[in-house]
Image: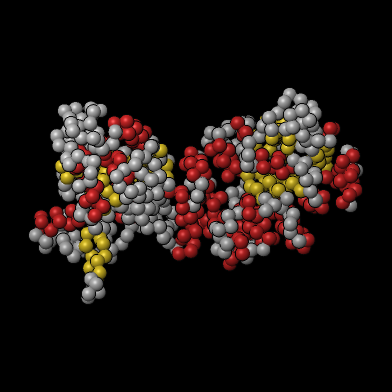
Amino acid sequence: MTPGLPSRAGTPPADWRDTRPPAGGRYSYAFLDEGAKREIRRRILKAAAIPGCQVPFGSREMPIARGWGTGGLQLTLSLIGPEDVLKVIDQGADDSVNAVNIKKFVTRVTGVAVTTDTAAATMIQTRHRIPEEPLQPHQILIFQVPIPEPLRLVEPSERETRRMHAEADYSRMWLYLYEDIVKFNEITVGARYPVLVNCRHLMDPSPIPRWDLAKLHQGEALFLFCAGREKRIYAVPPHTEVQPLSFEDFAFRVEAFAGRRCARCGSGGTYLDEVIDDATGRRTYACSDTAFCEKARRSCGAAEDSPTREGIA
Amino acid sequence: MKPVLQVRNLTKRYGPGCPECLERTGARHETNQCPRCRSILACREVSIDLYPGEVLGIVGESGSGKSTVVRLLHFDFEPTAGEFFLDLNGNGLTGVGPGQNLFALSAFHRRQVRNERMGIVYQNARMGLRMKVSAGGNIAERLLTAGWRHVGRMRNRASGLLEQTEVPVERMDELPRNFSGGMQQRVQIAKALATRPAVLLLDEVTTGLDVSVQARVLDLIRGLQQELGVATLVVSHDLGVIRLLTSRTIVMRHGCIVEEGLSDQILEDPQHPYTQLLVNSTL
């Protein structure tokens, strides 16, 4: 057990917005001090008001290293309340080390319930995936973002990229895609595909696969993005236009799985991970979203195809 | 006839400035530095009219402010004072009314005007081209800013322009840094003409090229200018270029215009002592 941390926050104070730390603990409810939480909430409001616009904030030191989800963690901690149910995923998996550690930490400082069920969660912190199950209006999806600036690829200067965003001057990004087409006859950007939000701001959707971009468009839930190292918060509020950049004659394409199905649950139309057996060298495919895969297995007895959102096979 | 480009009292000052700056600088005082506040007046109260289809030359020695004028008109940096009007040909851009002083516009609208109505060719191709992007891509960039979103159509337009400017079309997807100086200059010209601009600005286009290449580039510019009828502003210190390309010339010294008139007249019968010196020293 980490010394200095209360073993459990136990019962939260009657009014959890109370600035006093929980009885006996040396930290505020949800680790961050109330001032920090208030600042981050204000930044979230601004970000949600200007969809896709990067809002700077004072990123705090966290008990995990920068680049391991400190941004997402700060959003989670500043928004979480005792009634929330938390789910944390890492590339679709609920049980990877990063996800488990974050979950443990948040329960220790808040005492909230955790779940792996997407539908049961009110708050989902994610690294590089959006759950397959459609999100509901009461849910918040929090992305961990490594590089919030989509124009960083073409312009190293922050001053210059800010000017480009201010003037909606995205021709350099388009030029990058054009050059890609000239060289390879297709756009080679995989994850982190740049999207235009609300027909105005170019946004880095964090390294989610192209497959997941459609879920951002006119979504039901609130999508929040935060980069702890780069100190930026941005958001896609519900029912917002999110369009990937594409040319008239080179349309945007998502990953194709050539009709393959998950070897565990049999689902088609989900984002699949390739699994290679080291011993036999045999390739199989499995759902990247483990919670969805489990649910599909249980409900259909691991045999039949389950109803999924219609995807492109 | 209505001028396509009008500049009034364009001034660019580097330094704090004082009330005497304008009185104590200029050709009459043989300096562009204010003796009181030590500010430099790169150009002072320059007024220019450019008529449709015309080629206007700006000639002067190094440091006379001719490049400053062109860069200011291209919004490369902010002027200290002055007004700039462009005939937007009826089809005005959103947010830019006719008779609007373009220097008073927001950066966004200025960039819009620049992208759609102006083309510039710099002396150094490094300033006008992206060296890490293919020649075709450089031209496509202008089209992309103008809202083109069809790769095939952009490539057609780019190859057409490269053909016009005599760059081998099969080298379209090569990086311009593999090109010779003359070819880079021709790619720059193609890029400048990509969106069919109303005004073309040429800033010392042939300086640094060898004589035979110079002649071919000048020939190309003259041919294109006559074909497209685009109003052109040519900046050069080379009177040969001015003689070959322009119909009207402005002579600048110490940031101000010292003489203005038909090119032939200025070259054959210069009035101002400085112009006389300039003509005599080259011919």
Q: How many marks?
A: 0
Residue B205 percent location from the top left of the image:
71, 52
Residue A187 percent location from the top left of the image:
42, 59
**Left or right: where does residue B276 sit relative to residue B175?**
right
Residue at image point 73% right, 47% down: B234
Tell which residue pokes out farthest to the bottom in this image. Answer: A280
B169 and A300: which is toward the camera: A300
Tell which residue pokes out farthest to the left in this image. Answer: A301
> Is B250 rendered above or below residue A304?
above
* Residue B194 can be seen, yes or no: yes
Residue A55 percent location from the top left of the image:
40, 38
Quarter of the image with the C terminus of chain A in it: bottom left
- Image quarter for residue A304? bottom left
* Residue B55 can be seen, yes or no: no
A258 and B230: which is toward the camera: A258
**Left or right: where does residue A29 sit relative to residue B226?**
left
A251 and A295: which is toward the camera: A295
Residue at image point 18% right, 60% down: A267
Residue at image point 23% right, 28% down: A20
Tell which residue pokes out farthest to the front in this image. Answer: A3
> Is A130 rendered above or below residue A258?
above
- Image quarter for residue B65? top right
Residue at image point 14% right, 54% down: A295
Residue B56 percent location from the top left of the image:
75, 44
**Left or right: where does residue B63 sit relative to residue A65?**
right
Q: What sort of colour scheme is used for the picture? A: secondary structure
> Is A27 rendered above or below residue A195?
above
- Image quarter for residue B74? top right
